[in-house]
Image (cartoon, rainbow, N blue to C red):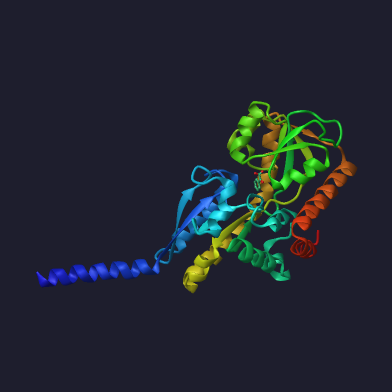
């Protein structure tokens, strides 16, 4: 009887002490589950849960069904969640400099060497109480998709769905903008509430947007940025072993960007097959568009955060 009690106690103790070594982190994504910009984060979670068995575990709550995309940055800041997959465009209200991340196209390894990453980390520490663990999709560009054909580089008379990523450039070329989360794009297009939208080159099929999209405008511009953020207090409270699992998985996650080139090529073909036509103005106009996009993008960041914005631009080399 006594022995049984002792055994039960010992087993109980053992369970608690091993549980105390394993930390569970609550995760959300600002993009829909199993879609283009959540998929690699979900692979990262699987990797952490496999490699980190008994050390660190990620409990994935889900995408926008669990939390509105524009609230994810604040949820990391206030530790409502521990770790998140989110683009800077969704938390510019807390950190205006986050809008500059799309203007940085250097690889992460380069950014880690030349101090860019360290500055981005510092900004996230200060403004978002977050650790910037990884950046994904730096080699994936954005496009403007349209349902009305335009004959020149001019959005006058068009209403275009944006996020902070595209707002300044669309307005610079005369368009009217309406900001929505990705989850509202399909209905807005279907009802003709908007004449087009900004989105990366990849991912429109996940959401069925090819059914309500006629044209993709060239050229590609900017650089997608989807970060993995960890609440800073949570990060500081982890053991070296726990941080190592996350750091190793983060580098692996960033390495998945090598898959993007093939994915982009396949996506362009798939869009053409789905009947999406391209609108092209030629090399000279493309250059004008990209230059203007870059200039108005930086101007907007620098206006909202003069010192940090200027420093970020200098580091970016763009
Ligand atoms: O919602 C968006 O169009 C947007 O800003 C974005 C940013 C990164 C990846 C995908 C979409």
Residue 103 seen in render: yes
Q: Name the residue: 71% across, 66% down.
A: 116
Spot occupied by residue 121 in the image (x, y as percentages of width and height): 64, 66
Residue 219 seen in render: no
**Observer-nearest of 129 and 62:** 129
Q: Name the residue: 85% across, 43% down.
A: 286
Is residue 77 depicted above or below 140 in this figure?
below
Is residue 142 depicted above or below 82 in this figure?
above
Q: Name the residue: 70% across, 61% down.
A: 107
The single residue placed furthest to the left in the displayed view is 1
Q: In which quadrant of the rendered image does the N terminus lie?
A: bottom left
Is residue 91 depicted above or below 154 in this figure?
below
Direction from residue 160 to residue 40 in the image, left or right: left
Q: Name the residue: 37% across, 68% down.
A: 20
Spot occupied by residue 246 in the image (x, y as percentages of width and height): 52, 64
Direction from residue 251 to residue 219 in the image, left or right: right
Is residue 88 depicted above or below 145 in this figure?
below
Direction from residue 269 to residue 30 in the image, left or right: left
Spot occupied by residue 318 in the image (x, y as percentages of width and height): 81, 58
The quadrant where residue 3 appears: bottom left
**Observer-nearest of 186 and 107:** 186
């Amino acid at each position: 009887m006594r022995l049984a009690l002792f055994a039960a106690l010992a087993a109980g103790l053992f369970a608690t002490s091993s549980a105390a070594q394993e930390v569970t982190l609550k995760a959300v994504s600002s993009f829909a589950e199993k879609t283009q910009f959540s998929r690699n984060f979900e692979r990262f979670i699987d990797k952490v849960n496999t490699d980190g068995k008994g050390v660190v575990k990620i409990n994935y709550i889900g995408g926008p069904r669990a939390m509105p995309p524009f609230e994810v940055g604040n949820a990391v800041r206030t530790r409502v969640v521990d770790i998140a997959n989110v683009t800077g465009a969704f938390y510019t209200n807390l950190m205006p400099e986050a809008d500059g991340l799309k203007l940085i196209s250097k690889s992460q390894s380069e950014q880690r060497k030349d101090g860019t990453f360290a500055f981005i980390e510092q900004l996230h520490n200060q403004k978002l109480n977050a650790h910037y663990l990884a950046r994904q999709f730096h080699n994936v560009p954005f496009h403007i998709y349209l349902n009305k054909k335009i004959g020149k580089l001019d959005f006058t008379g068009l209403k275009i769905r944006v996020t902070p990523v595209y707002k300044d450039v669309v307005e610079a070329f005369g368009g009217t903008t309406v900001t929505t989360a990705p989850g509202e794009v399909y209905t807005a297009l279907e009802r003709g509430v908007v004449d087009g939208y900004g989105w990366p080159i990849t991912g429109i099929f996940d959401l069925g947007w090819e059914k309500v999209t006629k044209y993709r405008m060239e050229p590609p511009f900017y650089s997608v940025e989807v970060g993995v953020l960890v609440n800073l207090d949570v990060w500081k409270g982890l053991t070296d072993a726990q941080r190592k699992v996350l750091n190793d998985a983060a580098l692996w996650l960033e390495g998945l960007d090598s898959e993007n080139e093939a994915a982009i090529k396949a996506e362009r073909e798939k869009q053409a097959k789905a009947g999406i036509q391209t609108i092209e103005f030629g090399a000279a106009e493309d250059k004008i568009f990209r230059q203007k996009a870059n200039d108005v993008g930086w101007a907007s960041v620098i206006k909202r955060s003069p010192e940090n914005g200027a420093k970020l631009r200098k580091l970016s080399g763009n």
